[in-house]
Image: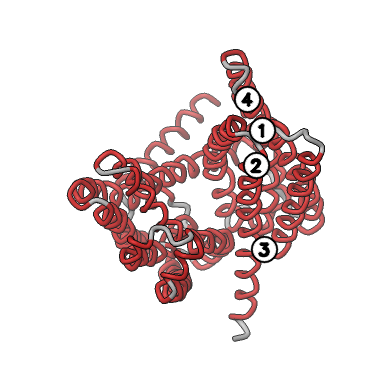
Amino acid sequence: MSRFVPWLHKGGCAVLDQGLISGSNFVVSILLARWLVPEQYGAYAVAFGFFVLLSLVYGSLVLEPMAVFGGSSYRKSLRGYLGSLIWIHVAMSLAIAAAFGGSAFIAWKVAPASGLGGALAGVTIASPCVLLFWLARRSFYLELSPAKAAVGALIYFAISLGLLFLVYRRGLLSPFSAFVLIGIAALGTGIYLLVRLQKELRPGPFDHPVSEVWGRHWRYGCWALLSCVASWVPANIYYALLGSFKTMAQSGQLKALMNLTLPVEQVKVALGLLFLPYAASVIGREGKASAGALSRRMTLVAVGIAIAYWAVILFWQGAAFHALYSGRYIEVTHLLPIVALGSIAWCGSFGSAIALRAMESPSSVFVAFALATAASLVIGIPATWFYGLSGAIWGTNVSDVLSWIFLVWILRRKAAGRSLGIERLGAWRGRQEATAAEGVSD
């Protein structure tokens, strides 16, 4: 119990941190839907979709590698490492400003009345601020201090909603002003967190140039990004397939069912923020042989939470659908146990995926997800054609179950010192690049 209680506190703070960020995005979206005219809200939604894509790229290239390398390679010099990441952030912010600023100008020229140009201009201003805030938040997880990150999330939540209400009361609300207000809240909170980090992170010698840090992030992050894409496909493609093969109403039914998986997903994301740097530190200290036991413990936590959650939801499924959907979609509640099965299996892959990432092997995670996605499409597309909604759910479940199986198998190979062919190719390319660099320097 003496070891369990601190981790229970840290896990609760990580869930609170993630909940505040997700909750703020949800509340802002709902308020803007109520306060903006449909054309303006549509422009906000389109621009926000571009921001989501940007956040996916930033998370893969900066935040996830930071959790791995900050917990292992740069563990003893976090302050210098964070300084390099800030320079990388500045460079990416300039690229974002150029890309989104140009897009905003084109949208304004082509359709000045649509509001999309203003929305994209708002994203241009807000994105570097929000991403800096995320960078500062995630840095606290390197010290396993999610409570301090949660404080920052609470400050951001209060400032962003407060500014939004103020601007709405003054009649100045638009997609552009909404994004700018979010950026102001994120920038203020991010600076506050960075000041705290400067005082709390351990100083130490750091003689790694920014180019070296970026190179390691890029080699890791490109595989992390591919893994995100591979896991996104089976989770989202069946909405479009149902709309094409059957009716859009069945796509809505699938969305209504899958909405109930979101709380488990948010908890899993929060635990991933906490466990990834911890796992990288343990594996860096004890070696790959520790990955198996570490993976099993993390999987047990994730699956245990999922089982407890779904036991409650399945017991009260009628009441849950009435509360969420005002009595609608009751006709598909009998499919909820199948959705629960897939959700639990997806949580089963959590420990192995975290362990492989902590071993600096995101390519292994991509291989597992890609194989599972391919099998899902081979089985799920004809199942959706013949069986409709239930076939789509089983198609998704195939991916969830096979992801678990493939990740466990690959982790065992890695822990035993056997590599995948794709990793040998990556190592060969790394040696070729190093040889070429030595030839240039000579």
Local secondary structure at mark 1:
helix
Amino acid identity at mark 3: Pro
Q: Which mark is residue 175?
A: 1
Q: Residue at x 64, y 51 (%)?
A: 27
Amino acid identity at mark 2: Leu
**The image quarter in which residue 141 lies:** bottom right
Local secondary structure at mark 3:
helix
Amino acid identity at mark 1: Pro
**Cβ atoms under marks 2 and 1 closer than 8 Å:** yes
Mark 3 Cα within 10 Å, few/some/many (few <14, many 20+)? many
The percent position of residue 50, horizontal first and vertical second, equals 54, 34
According to the picture, the residue beneath numbered tag 2 turns out to be: 32
* 2 or 1: tag closer to the N-terminus: 2
Distance, label 1 to label 4, CA atoms, is 7 Å
* 3 or 1: tag closer to the N-terminus: 3
Q: Is residue 412 visible?
A: no
Q: Residue at x 79, y 39 (%)?
A: 167
According to the picture, the residue beneath numbered tag 4 turns out to be: 115
